[in-house]
Image: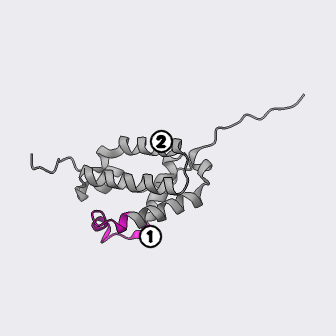
Amino acid sequence: MTVTEEVTPVSHYERIGGASSVKAAVEVFYDKVLADPELAGYFADVNMAEQRRHLALMLTVVLGGPNEYAGRGLAEAHQSLHIPVAHYVKVGEHLTATLTELGVPADIIADVQTVLGQVQDQVVSSGNGTGA
């Protein structure tokens, strides 16, 4: 009689290669964002080493890896920036392009895009930018 191991589903985090892959994605992503003239200004006074570390921890959680994030919530961190939807969409496009370039499977990218949609209201400004 053989003992069969229960197969634990592999997380997206494990599928893409774990911490080193997340770190690589964050580096490429912020290179794109900081090169984007519409977005770079948000990071002018930001400690980018710390910012990259925060995003790596958050992306790890989104991908099903270990939750070691202890920073501010999304709404608290972004409220004072008054981010319009158009800029949020551009950031999402940069993240999607980064993951695609790095060969991340399409189903994982789709799940990340779903999360981006779910948290948009916590990041974008509540105003619509028209003064209305």
Q: What separation in Å lies between label 1 and label 2 (alpha carbons)?
A: 26 Å
Quarter holding the N terminus is top right
The percent coordinates of residue 78 (x first, y second) are 29, 55
The amino acid type of the residue labelled 1 equals Ala
Q: Quadrant of residue 55?
A: bottom left
Colour pattern: one colour
Q: Is residue 93 above or below residue 106?
A: below
**Residue 61 seen anywhere in this rendered image of the structure:** yes
What is the number of the mark on residue 49?
Answer: 1
Query: Within the magenta stretch, is there residue 41?
Result: yes
Residue placed at 31% from the left, 52% from the top? 88
**Front-most of residues 56 and 34:** 34
Q: Write the start and end of the magenta stretch as one range.
A: 33-51
Q: Is residue 119 above or below residue 32?
A: above
**Front-most of residues 77 and 84:** 84
Residue placed at 52% from the left, 41% from the top? 107
Judged from the image, the secondary structure of the residue bearing numbered disc 2 is helix
